[in-house]
Image (cartoon, coloured by chain):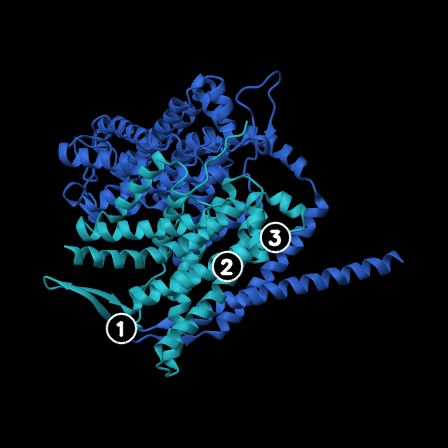
Amino acid sequence: MSDVRSAQGGRDTLIRYIRDAGGVGLLALAIFVPFIGLRLHGETNGLVLHYRPKLLVIGVVLAMLARLLVLIWQERRVHQGRAAWRAARVASAGKYVAPALLASAALLPLVPGIANFYIDLGVLVMTYVMLGWGLNIVVGLAGLLDLGYVAFYAVGAYSFALLAHYFHLSFWECLPLSGIFAAIWGMCLGFPVLRLRGDYLAIVTLAFGEIIRLVITNWISLTGGPNGIYNIPHPTFFGLNFNLGGGPGTFSGFFGIDPDPKQLTTYLYYIIFFLALLTNWVTLRLRRLPMGRAWEALREDEIACRSLGINVRNTKLTAFAIGAMFGGFAGCFFATRQNFISPDSFTFIESATVLAIVVLGGAGSQLGVALAAVVMIGIPALLQDLSIYRMLFFGLALVIMMVVRPRGFVSTRTPSIALGKRQQISSELMSEGHG
Amino acid sequence: MIAYALQQLINGITLGMVYGLIAVGYTMVYGIIGMINFAHGDVFMVGAYVGIIVLTAFSGMGIAAVPVGLLVALLVSVALCGVYGFTIERAAYRPLRGSFRLAPLISAIGMSILLENFVQTSQGAKDRAIPEPIPGGFTIMQQHGFVVQMSYMQIAIIVTTLVTLGIFTYIVTKTPLGRAMRAIEQDAKMAALLGVNTNRVISLTFVIGSALAAVAGIMFLSYYGVINFFIGFNAGIKAFTAAVLGGIGSLPGAVLGGLLIGLIESFWSGYATIAYKDVAVYSILAIVLMFMPTGLLGRADIEKV
């Protein structure tokens, strides 16, 4: 009897799957026909269409297979229902993951025989870790949605580039200045948006990022416009530069070793490593100060904050300013690392990437943000062979990761302050802020 | 010079109509499920591409009647963009409904990147151009040798927009679907309790919004004649700005915002520097929002304790 029923159920499930996959196939057909099935060729006014039926069939079949896999996976997930158990495991593993990650990050350039490429990749990932942590102050702690974070990155980078270009200042002189300039710009952004909430705030921050980029692009006499600024100096090591020529004034000459491009990369790696750690440390400290507590309170409930006498204006402005300051530091570092900057490096897609890192990490979680930066920046960089398909997969991965883990990698949090025993709570209990 | 100003006015209104149509899609989605549909601008771009493909197919078959081709392109594009909107909502937004506010935003940004690169990889990164589909126009006035022209294309765009918006307004205000949409906008849970199939209505909202974006895409294609895979970003941001300027969630606000942005752009390009026209748009947005934090026609946010 039960066999019959389960066989019946099995057949129903199968029919449901086939019907579902068939529907997806039809949708895929409609979506793929104009873009995969047909292709425009030729020049202006002489366009012709080429047909690619084989590719179209492959695309549709792939879409149907993907849908079947999703269905099977969903079925399994319903049966397992071990989410709580897994969350507990992740939480306990988190205790070891963070120090392990830190140690491996600190030792990465010292691995014997490591290629320069990987250290350079580490520099890139670490830059995004720092940007993620900086934006985390604004989005994760204060709950203010900022879609124009790249503006501060640009301000930091251009502060250094312009000061180096016109006044011949060095990296170490400009690093604090870049942070200060970015913080001032952060407050400039903060003032007009004090009263705005939610999506109004989002569009103004986005617009702010675009304004900065457009001004940099069009103010050609100052910034060189789209051509950018060349010959930005690399940082020096207590006055020693990293020229590959050797000689008395250089790092290799002073220590009597062979010049190697790896020395500069390693040095850059440790600079950004410590800058990122500084960001993390300051954030963790600030969370214990009244200011940090006010940020988190603001995220949870703005009205309650106001009723309890918290100065909402100052709280928001400090969040913008401090978040922006770290963006400025990172920008200054970016300029010195690249040697060359142009407005192309500061498009909206950068802001979106950093925001994605913050959200994917689990807004507010420092460890999650670092993990997300490694996943989102490190993996695509390793897959450079895919070249033009890289961004395609990047977009697809963003959608999939969000759908699978809407609360990010680290979906538990330890509250900054608790009555009695402090314990991990689910991020579901955390408000995301409306400002 | 009045003639010069009049010409800018005509150009600005044409441009504003296109922005307004896209902005309506943003504002509808926002009104109903409260999320920024970042992929909307890219649906507009898909619409324009479908248009150029249909037009190319027509000329390949040796059919020379451009207005017919344009009409067919419009219909095909509307239908296909509807499918796109439906699929995007089902795949990327529905699983995230009711979760963390930033999750659908990131998903939408991912979808936007995906669409852009899908079109880029499948159709190439090159600009694609078509000859002007409806050439010519008529002269409105002449002053000191400056000729004010209104092209037939501009008239077609303004008429199409008005017709589309008319149909759309009819759907929203007079049909059961429109009533359901407005009900969900006010209170989704209550609407569901009273028997409104919210999933279906939300899907249809995306389909309608995408269809409007497709109309805008075809108009963009036939007005400028050149498209590439990246046009969706700029147009999307502008339309989003328009929606927010008008007060997000308000349908007349979206059209008003679109028109305003079109006019600002065209007058700024005509009288100041063309390079800073976008800066002007964004600055005016920031200034307006400083004094009216919910946009021109937006409802004030009621703070509940």
For this rendering, which residue is in front, A345 or A378? A345
Which residue is at a point 56% across and 62% down the rendered structure image?
A: A63
- Whether residue A16 sits left or right of residue B124 in the image: it is right
Chain in blue in the render: A
Q: Among all residues in the image, which is located at the extreme left?
A: B144
For this rendering, which residue is in front, B304 or A186? B304
Q: Which mark is residue A97?
A: none
Above or below, A294 against B116 in this view is above
* Secondary structure of the residue carrying numbered label 3: helix
**Do we see residue A119 in this rendering?**
no
The amino acid beneath tag 1 is Pro
Mark 2 near mark 3, Cβ–Cβ under 8 Å?
A: no
Q: Position of residue A26 (x, y in %)?
A: 57, 67
* Secondary structure of the residue carrying numbered label 1: loop
In terms of image quadrants, where is residue B219? bottom left
Q: Residues within 10 Å of mark 2 (few under 14, many from 20)?
A: few
**Residue wearing tag 1:** B135
Q: Which mark is residue B199?
A: 3
In the rendered image, the quadrant that contains the N terminus of chain A is: bottom right
Mark 2 or 3, closer to the camera: 2
Q: Earlier in the sequence, mark 1 or mark 3?
A: 1
Above or below, B209 against A137 in this view is below
Calculate the distance from the C-alpha at mark 2 to the C-alpha at mark 3: 22 Å
Q: Position of residue B198 (x, y in %)?
A: 61, 51
**Residue wearing tag 2:** B170
Q: Position of residue A110 (x, y in %)?
A: 39, 34
Chain in cyan in the render: B
